[in-house]
Amino acid sequence: MARTAASRADGTRTSGFGKLLGVAVLGALVWFTRRQPGEPPKQDDHATAFADNETDPENFDQTRSAGPGGMRSQPRRTWDRIDQAADESFPASDPPAY
């Protein structure tokens, strides 16, 4: 009797299910250990410019608090006193003259 790739030395055949199960377990192990935890999703019940828990969705006057703390995302650079004063003056027509 000729031996095939799916038979053992004692003449019994293997189904390959054990190998398939092992590969699936290893693949799942790699998948779950290599995934990077994502950033928590932002709340969708307010406008884009507002920080989380900054506004009430039913408020008709959606004005955010002044300063980088009221912004939804972090500023690209640190704010100086001119940036802070200009942000605090909004929605006035005249920004402070520094």
Image (cartoon, helix red, strand yellow):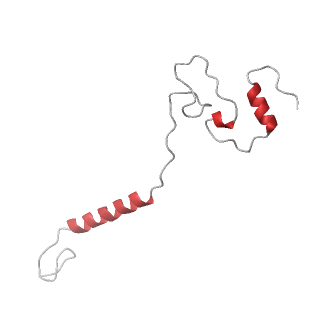
Left or right of 25, for residue 73: right
**Can you say whether 79 is above or below 6 in the image?**
above
Q: Where is residue 7 in the image (x, y as percent from the top left)?
A: 17, 76
Q: Where is residue 38 in the image (x, y as percent from the top left)?
A: 49, 49
Quadrant of the rendered structure where residue 31 is?
A: bottom left
Left or right of 88, for residue 14: left
The quarter of the picture where the C terminus appears is top right
**Can you say whether 5 is above or below 53 in the image?**
below
Left or right of 91, for residue 25: left
Closer-to-camera residue (70/14): 70
Q: Position of residue 51 (x, y in %)?
A: 59, 34
Q: Which residue is drawn at 80% across and 37% down?
A: 81
Q: Residue at x 44, y 60 (%)?
A: 34
Quadrant of the rendered structure where residue 19 is?
A: bottom left
**Can you say whether 3 is above or below 47 in the image?**
below
Q: Residue at x 45, y 56 (%)?
A: 35
Closer-to-camera residue (56/11): 56
